[in-house]
Each structure stands twice: as C-alpha cells, then as structure tokens.
Image: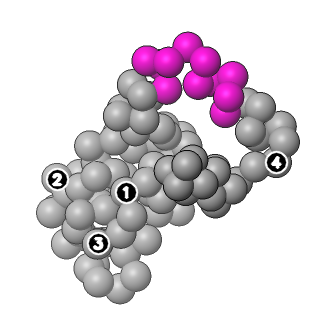
Amino acid sequence: MRDGKFGLREMAKMLEISPAYLSRIETNEEKNPPAEELLQKIADLLGDDFDKLMSLAGRVSTDVKEYITQDEGLPQFLRTARQQGLTSRDLGEMLKHKGKK
C-alpha cells in the first residue's frame, strides 16, 4: 500500500493511528475494515484512488450508498447487471449511448 513513499511509523503518525494497526491493514490481518474517513486520508496521502481502496476494504462509500437507496429500482438493476455479467465498462458504454440519443 505505501509503495515505499513513507515508512510505517511515519505514515501511521500522519494518519493518527498506531503502526500496529496500519501494519494489520496492509497485511489484511485486520478483521474490521478501516473507516471510510481513514481510507480517504490514506488515498489523499498516497495519491491513490479512494474508490479502489474502498473496494479493497469491502466498503461502499456513503455517497454511493445514498444514491442506491434513493431509487428503489436501482438495487434490482445492479443485481440484474451482475447476473448478466455486465462490467462497469459495459454500463459506462450504455450511458454513453444513452447520452447520444
């Protein structure tokens, strides 16, 4: 995760967490995924993709949860897309074509 940019202790101090906790996160030994706020700090610090870190942690960001729950048909749409093997790229292409009409 750190890719040599920071030492373990240095990065833990910047994130205001213990080096042991950061080590457990990096080695996937931490049983509970980090909070969204901590993942955002890590992404900002490392210049990494926040959504990628959220996905690796098995979390969905608050804004995405809110969007999905605002439309009662959206969860079923996403299940159907998954069942049909559609990828995010496929869905992006569908949106591009919709915008051209």
Q: Amino acid at mark 1?
A: Phe
Residue at the outermost bottom position: 4
| 3 with respect to 87 (left or right) | left
* 9 left or right, relative to 52: left
Which mark, residue 46? Answer: 3
Badge 1 density bin: few <14, some 14–19, many ≥20, Cα 10 Å = some
Looking at marks 1 and 4 on the same chain, the residue that comes earlier in the sequence is marked by: 1
- What's the CA distance linking mark 2 and mark 1? 18 Å
Q: Secondary structure at mark 1?
A: helix
Depth check, mark 1 against mark 4: the one in front is: 4
Q: Is 29 colored magenta in this rendering?
A: no
- Looking at the rendering, the stretch of residues picked out in magenta corresponds to 68-78
Badge 2 is on which residue?
16
Task: Give the distance between the C-alpha atoms of the residues marked 1 and 3, in whole angstroms.
Answer: 10 Å
| Dot in front, 1 or 3 | 1
Q: Give the spatial CA distance, label 3 vs label 2.
A: 15 Å
* Residue type, numbered disc 2: Glu
In this rendering, the answer to whether 81 lies above or below 53 is above
Residue type pointed to by label 4: Gly
Can you identify the residue that label 1 sits on?
50
